Amino acid sequence: MRVVGLTGGIASGKSLAAELFGELGVPVLDTDRVARQVVRPGSPGLEAVVRRFGRQVLTDDGRLDRGRLRQIILDDQRARRDLEAILHPLIRAETEAWIARQSSPYCIIVVPLLFEAGWEELFDTILVVDTPVALQRRRLAERDGMTEEQIDALLGAQMERRARLERADGLLYNGASPAALREQVEAWHRRLLAAA
């Protein structure tokens, strides 16, 4: 089975591309969902995060306050590295266990910070979903209500767009219409089935 990594900048359309692969019957795992699972209440992951960042990162009902934690790590690079050191091994272990249970010709793993986390060796093929920066910024403002300063910080924490594209095996351009993205996903689906 081929293991395909799907990555891209924030608000590039990774979720839509993954959904389109899923509609074709491809098993898809989104590591953002795994990241939520490893910090559920009572988990060792959440306990480790609280030990490092304090109870300020919890909501009143004991869940992780993701918005608060995001603000902390955007303002402090060391804090971001500490959080990644806690979460990335947990997410990676869950991801590898999921891959081991699959039996299809190929599967898709959505990893927003694939290159930044150093996960390249896990994948046979890496596809990047790319969209113009102006469109990313508009989506973040409209979807998440982020300020220009927050958007700058978030985009600045990710790998530069050109570097991401240079390291990819393939591109899914998401700057036109959903139908255009669907056509590209279907073309890659055929290629990946043939390669498997």
Image (cartoon, rainbow, N blue to C red):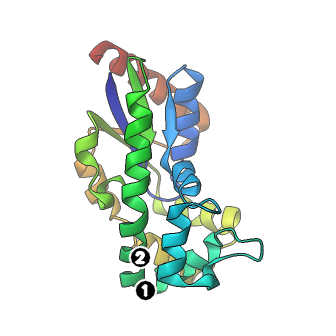
Toward the viewer: 20 or 183? 20
Toward the viewer: 9 or 35? 35
Residue 189, given in percent of the width and then of the height, sits at 42, 21
Toward the viewer: 165 or 33? 33
Toward the viewer: 132 or 50? 50
Does residue 151 appear in the picture of this structure? no
Q: Residue at x 55, y 67 (%)?
A: 46
Per the image, the residue denoted by label 1 is 76
Per the image, the residue denoted by label 2 is 80
Does residue 38 appear in the picture of this structure? yes
In this picture, is 94 found above or below 136?
Answer: above
Residue 193, given in percent of the width and then of the height, sits at 36, 15
Can you name the residue that lies furthest to the right here?
61
Q: Is residue 108 found left or right of 58 in the rendered image?
A: left
Can you name the residue that lies furthest to the top here?
194
Q: Is residue 124 found left or right of 54 in the rendered image?
A: left
Residue 57, given in percent of the width and then of the height, sits at 61, 79
In this picture, is 21 found above or below 45?
Answer: above
**Mark 1 residue type:** Asp
Q: Is residue 147 found left or right of 192 in the rendered image?
A: right
Q: Quadrant of the C terminus?
A: top left
Q: Residue at x 44, y 45 (%)?
A: 94
Label annotation for residue 193: none
Mark 2 touches mark 1? (CB < 8 Å): yes
**Mark 2 residue type:** Arg
Q: Quadrant of the N terminus?
A: top left
In this picture, is 36 found above or below 54?
Answer: above
Q: Residue at x 59, y 39 (%)?
A: 177
Mark 2–mark 1 distance (CA, rounded to whole Å): 6 Å
Q: Residue at x 47, y 81 (%)?
A: 52
Residue 76, given in percent of the width and then of the height, sits at 43, 86
User: Label 1 crowding class (10 Å Cα cut-off): few <14, some 14-19, many 20+?
Assistant: few
